[in-house]
Image (cartoon, coloured by chain):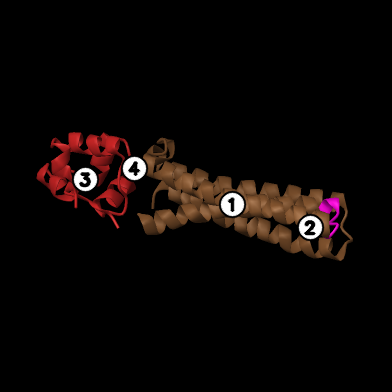
Chain colours: A red, B brown
Amino acid sequence: MAAIANNIRRLRFDRDEMTQAELATKVGVTRQTINAIEQNKYSPSLETAFRIAEALGVPIGEAFSYR
Amino acid sequence: MSYREKTTWISLLAMGAVYGWYFWKVMPVLIAGHGDALHYAHLLGSTIAALAILQIIPMIAFAAASPTDAQAPQDEREKLYALKGTQAAYFVLVAGALFASVAGIFFHADAGMLANLILLSVVTSNMAKYLVEVAHFRFAG
């Protein structure tokens, strides 16, 4: 389904094993939404994608890719 | 399961159970053609009270268990699923309204029957909304 892939799970673990809940709080969404994005079940809006990348301290192209 | 999903499940189940009971009681009386307005009003009053109790108590319990989630505004995914639910509910409501119109025009349904058919449309459209939302929460992520 999802043509948008992401590296959120790996990036979270690279950042002192940041939990989904911690990332969700930084981004301003629920933990379940972060989980759905990680599993490619939900494609976030551009704004949320930028916020996730910012929270993980990487450029958006490193957090998300289009395939 | 998120707070929002839990409350949607509660609304779906409570509405299904309570209005299922209401229409189970009322429809045979209406179809037989010997119901009176006071009877409907009494049953409907009990139904609304039961629905309020069945929805409010679990929601208070869920909110007490996770107050942060309960106070948080809907995020974009939850808003999207709510919109998809509302879209489905619209079509169900329109179909119900058309069905009630046809019953009134072609089958000369009385006021009590028409009122209950419209109420049935409202209830089924709300249930369609909740059903689409929980389906998205469960299967879309």
How far across and down, in percent of the image, does residue B33 sit? 88, 62
Asked if residue A52 is among those painted magenta in the image, a careful observer would answer no
For discs 4 and 1, the disc positioned in front in the rendered view: 1
Task: Give the number of callouts.
Answer: 4
Task: Name which residue type carries label 1.
Answer: Phe
In space, the residues marked 3 and 4 are separated at their CA atoms by 12 Å
Rounded to the nearest angstrom, the CA distance separating label 1 from label 3 is 40 Å
Asked whether B81 or A11 is in front, the reply is B81
Q: 10 Å neighbourhood of mark 4: few (<14), some, or many (≥20)?
A: many
Q: Which residue is mark 4?
A: A30
| Of labels 1 and 3, the one closer to you | 1
Q: Which residues are magenta?
A: B107-112
Quadrant assignment, res B34? bottom right
Check whether the beta carbons of the residues at disc 3 and disc 4 lie within 8 A of each other.
no
Secondary structure under badge 1? helix
Q: Does B109 lie within the magenta span?
A: yes
Give the number of the mark in front: 3 or 4.
4
Query: Which chain hosts label 3?
Result: A
Which of the two labelled residues, at mark 1 and mark 2, occupies the earlier sequence position?
1
Instruction: Determine the chain carrying the residue at label 4.
Output: A
How far across and down, in percent of the image, does residue A63 sit?
17, 43
Residue at figure coordinates x 80%, y 65% from the top left: B28
Quarter of the image with the N terminus of chain A is bottom left
Q: CA distance from mark 2 to mark 4?
A: 45 Å
How far apart marks 1 and 2 lie (CA) works out to 18 Å
Dot 4: element: loop
What number is the disc on residue A1? none
Seen at 74% across and 54% down, the residue is: B100
Q: Position of residue B102 (x, y in %)?
A: 76, 56
Per the image, the residue denoted by label 2 is B103
